[in-house]
Amino acid sequence: MTDSIYREIILEHSKNPSNRGTLDPADFTYEDTNPLCGDEIRIDVRVRDDHVSEIAFSGQGCAISQASASILTELVEGKSLDEVRGIGKEELLDEIGIPLSPARLKCALLSLKVLKAGVYGVEHAAEELEDV
């Protein structure tokens, strides 16, 4: 695909995000911010039989952070927790599909950091994404 198609996908996810909202109750909830740009992401997850049965995100920020959260929720819905733990930053960046500057990488990966913090705990999430 060309960069313009990926840009359209990002704009579409930003304008009409998948799984936007909150889940109450949730099996785990975590939220974080990117202090450099003010992006905020919260992810709520319900688990059934060790699989993500429902996932929702909320927050505010740039098109990249919001689209990335939308794309990530689509990517993990229905997956086992082990599969979710195995999702790395490259997989999410491949889904986003366009080259990003270092500052935009933090925007794009905030949702993954939040998801990993919820699934693993804060320390592991920080270790996994520390080189971003």
Image (cartoon, helix red, strand yellow):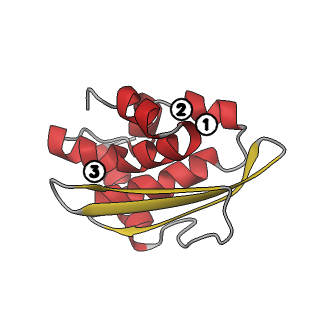
Query: Residue 99: x and y, percent?
Result: 25, 38
- Please tell me which residue is depicted at 45% across the width and 30% down the height of the picture: 124
**47 or 3: nearer the eye?**
47
**Vertical comparison of 116 with 17: above or below:** above
Pointer 2 residue: 87
Task: Of the two numbered discs 2 and 3 on the same chain, state the one appearing first in sequence.
Answer: 2
Quadrant position of residue 22:
bottom right
> What separation in Å lies between label 1 and label 3 (alpha carbons)?
20 Å
Specify the amino acid type for callout 2: Ile
| In-image side of 85 versus 127 (left or right) | right
Callout 2: SS: loop
Any mark on residue 84, and which?
1
Tell me if residue 8 can be seen. Answer: no
Query: Residue 94: x and y, percent?
Result: 42, 35
Location of the C terminus by quadrant is top left
Pointer 3 residue: 107
Specify the amino acid type for callout 1: Val
Task: Of the two numbered discs 1 and 3 on the same chain, state the one appearing first in sequence.
Answer: 1
- Please tell me which residue is depicted at 21% across the width and 62% down the height of the picture: 38
* Cβ atoms under marks 1 and 3 closer than 8 Å: no
> What separation in Å lies between label 2 and label 1 (alpha carbons)?
5 Å
Query: Residue 85: x and y, percent?
Result: 58, 32
- Please tell me which residue is depicted at 66% across the width and 62% down the height of the picture: 26
Callout 1: SS: helix
**81 or 3: nearer the eye?**
81
> What separation in Å lies between label 2 and label 3 (alpha carbons)?
17 Å
Query: Residue 103: x and y, percent?
Result: 16, 44
* Cβ atoms under marks 2 and 1 closer than 8 Å: yes
Q: Residues within 10 Å of mark 2 (few under 14, many from 20)?
A: some
